[in-house]
Amino acid sequence: MKPSGIGVQNREVSNDLESVDVTEKGRSPSGEVITSNRRMYMQFLAYGDVKDTSALISALKMAGVDGVLYEDINDPTGVGLLTLNEAPERFIEAYRPLLNSKPFAELRPKPEYTMLGRTYAIGYESDLVEALITRPFNRVVDPELRWAIWYPLRRSGSFEQLSTQEQNVILAEHGGVGRAFGRAHLGYDIRLACHGLDKNDNDFVIGLVGPDLTPLSMIVQRMRKTKQTSLHLEHLGPFFVGKVLWQSKPHSVAE
């Protein structure tokens, strides 16, 4: 006979599993909760010892990659490659063979800049496809947004100990900086969650994109004064700063 506690424990585990919800959530204009299972994954890789950027561009075009190739302002032989797709399998099945063949295989990887993340919803978005798919995709490939700063960050445990209300106040202050620059068309942020996806255990990947570099630097500067950055961040960076060398062509990703 099985111990009497086994059946009860199994039912509890089963109930816990049934309650797991991995959808992204928003809220319709009428106040109803809306959900979506769609997300955009983005991966950033950096390389050095680049002698022929035209060969890299040709390879990316032939492979039909959605993404951006940046010139590294801090490394005269460096580039950064951002690729994006809704299916994480794409990075293994399509992008991996590309990066393991010429001309990318001849470059020097800079793994300290490797970043992988997924778009996520905060809970108030009225159009989840726009927030999770269309907007981040269009910002990355927007030909007017020629400069970018990409970096990871990790929050300290002190933030997680705050109440939800306290967290929301801090996040609103932090997010207000980005929205102000966005309204002025000076810079836009791309927020990616990387929990369990980052080798250094970072929580988020942030991309700042804009037509000029100075406003992007000033976004980081102003965010230093917010409570989240000054009190509740454990780690920030390294920072990759680059100018667009090549972008894939915009296309519809809504459907």
Image (tube, rainbow, N blue to C red):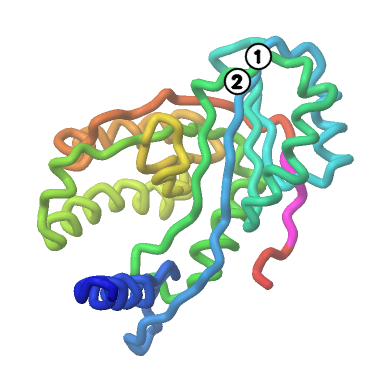
Q: Quadrant of the N terminus?
A: bottom left
Q: Does the residue at mark 2 contact the one at mark 1 (Cβ under 8 Å)?
A: yes
Relative to 119, does residue 220 appear above or below in the rendering? above
**Nearest the eye: 73 or 164:** 164
- The amino acid pointed to by label 2 is Asp
- Residue 27 is drawn in which quadrant? bottom left
Q: Which residues are magenta?
A: 247-251
The residue identified by callout 1 is 48
Expressed as whole percent of the image width and height from the top left, the position of residue 46 reads: 61, 24
**Nearest the eye: 109 or 30:** 109
Point 45% across, 29% down: residue:
214
- Residue at the extreme front of the image, as rendered: 1
The residue identified by callout 2 is 72
Point 77% across, 50% down: residue:
249
- Residue 83 is drawn in which quadrant? top right
207 sits to left or right of 16: right
Point 35% across, 75% down: residue:
14
**Nearest the eye: 157 or 2:** 2
